[in-house]
Amino acid sequence: MYFNSPYFFISILLCLSCFSKLTISAPLANSEQFQTQTIPSDFSIALNASLKYHPMIKGQQAQLSQKEFAVDGAKTAKYPSLSLSANSLNENYDEGTLVIEQPLWAFGRIDSTIDIAKANYNVEDLVLLQAKRSLLEDTAIAYASVRTAQYKISISKDNVAEHERLYQSIKRRESGHLASKADVSLAYSRLLQAQAALQQYKSILSVALNELLSLTRIKVATNSAIDEKELQIPQQQLLKEHAIKQSADIAYSRMKLKATKAQLSYEKVAYMPTISFRVERDLLDSNPNLIVDKTRAGFVIAGHLDGLGFTSYNNIEGASAAINAAQYELDNSINEIERRIDNLVINRDLQGNLRTAQLASVAALEHTMSSFLRQYETNRKSWVEVLNTQRELSQLRYSLIDINKQWLDISITLAAIIGQLDALAIMETS
C-alpha cells in the first residue's frame, strides 16, 4: 500500500519541512522589520522640537515667506498694467481715459529686478539655515548640560551613601572607644558637605532643564545619553573642506555676493527705456465740439535719466564697491571658519587626551580606595586617610564629567558647523 511505500515518508518529511518554514520564517521576517525601524533618541527628539516650536524659527520662516512674495511681485512686472483716470476739471464736459500697457522690452531691467528678488530670497533662506544651526547647537549643548548634571547627581548620591557608611562606621568605633567625638564630628561634617553638593547639583539640573525647555518649548525626555558615534568628526583637513562646503556662514556670504552682483546688473540697465504696446480708450468724453478717435493703440518708448546720467554712474560704482566688500566678507568667512576649525580640533584632541588620562586616574584611585577600605577595617589605615581618599575620588569623577562635557560641547559645535546635526534633527535644508 501507499502508507508502506517510501514515497509516503518522503511526503511527510516535505510537509514538515514546509510547515517549519512557515512557522519560523514569519517571526524572523517580523524581527528583521523591527530591527530596521529607526527609533529616534531623546537627543534627536529634543533637537527636532526646538526647530518645530521655537519662535525664532517661526519668525525667520515668516520673513522668508515675505521674500518669496517679493519674488512673485517682481515677476508681475512682465504682465500688462491697467490705469484709469477721470476728472471734471473742465466746467463744460467730463474727461476720462482707460490705458492698458504691455511691456515688450526693458533691456533686461525687469529680469534684473527678478534676479535681485530671487537672490534676496536665497539670502534670507540661508539666514534661516543659520538660525536653525545656531538653535540646534544651543539645544544640543543644553541637552548635554542636563545629562552632565544627571551624571553628577548620580555620583553625588554614591558619594553621600559612602560618607553615610563611613560616618556610621566611625560612630560604631566611638561606641567601642576606638574613635573620638572629634572623629565623629569630622565624619559628619564630610557627610553634610556631600549632601550639600547633592543639593547643589539638583539645583544645577533644574536650571539646565529650564534652559532646555526654553529652547524646545515643550518638555522632552532626557533619559538617553548622547551617542558619541553621532558626533564622529572627519580628519582635520577633510573637516576643513567639509566645513567650507557645508558652513551656513560661508554659504550666506556667497549668496550675499551673488545678490550684490545681481544689483550691479540691474544698475547697468536701470537708465534704459521701456518699449511697450499701449491701448488707450477715452471715457466720459462729453465735449460735442471734439471729434477724435476714442480708441488709440501703438508702440510707446519711455525712459528717464536722473541727474544727467550721473545718478546711474554713481549707482553702478556703488554696486561695484559692494561686490568688492561682499568678496572680502566671503574671504573673511572662509578664513574665520578655518581658524575656528583649527582651534576646536586642538581643544577637542586635548580634552580627549585629558579624558583618557582622567579615566586611568579614576580607575587607579578606585583601586586605592578599595585597598584603603580593607586596611581601614583592619586598623592599618586611619579614618582620615579614607575620608580624604573618598573626597578625592569624588572630585576626580566630577572632573572627568566636566572634561567629557567640554569634549561634547566642542564636538557639538563642529557637528553644527558641518551640518551634521541637521540629520539628527530630521531637518530639511533647502
Image (cartoon, helix red, strand yellow):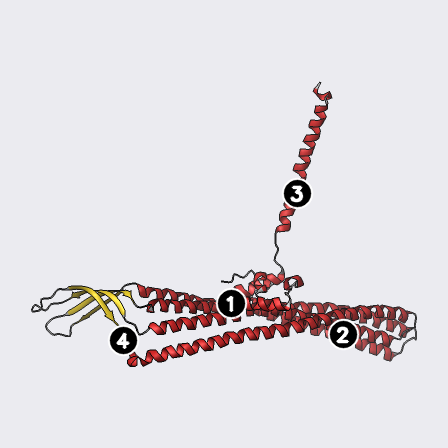
Percent across and percent down for residue 325 are: 46, 78
Helix, strand, or loop for circle 1?
helix
Q: Earlier in the sequence, mark 1 or mark 3?
A: 3
> How many residues crowd mark 3 within 10 Å: few (<14), some (14–19), many (20+)?
few
Helix, strand, or loop for circle 2?
helix
**Residue 154 picture quarter:** bottom right
Q: Are marks 1 and 3 in contact (CB under 8 Å)?
A: no
**Residue 170 picture quarter:** bottom right
Q: Does 194 sit above or below residue 219?
A: below
Amino acid found under the numbered disc labelled 1: Leu
Question: Where is the N terminus found, in terms of image quarters?
Answer: top right
Front residue of 363 and 417: 417
| Residue denoted by label 2 | 395
Measuring 29% from the left and 81% from the top, which residue is drawn there?
307
Circle nearer the viewer, 1 or 2: 1
Q: Earlier in the sequence, mark 4 or mark 2?
A: 4
| Residue denoted by label 1 | 129
Helix, strand, or loop for circle 4?
loop
Q: CA distance from mark 3 to mark 2?
A: 50 Å
Q: Does 307 sit above or below residue 405?
A: below
Residue furthest top in the image: 1
| Residue denoted by label 3 | 27
Q: CA distance from mark 1 to mark 2?
A: 41 Å
Q: Earlier in the sequence, mark 4 or mark 3?
A: 3
> How many residues crowd mark 2 within 10 Å: few (<14), some (14–19), many (20+)?
some
| Residue denoted by label 4 | 304
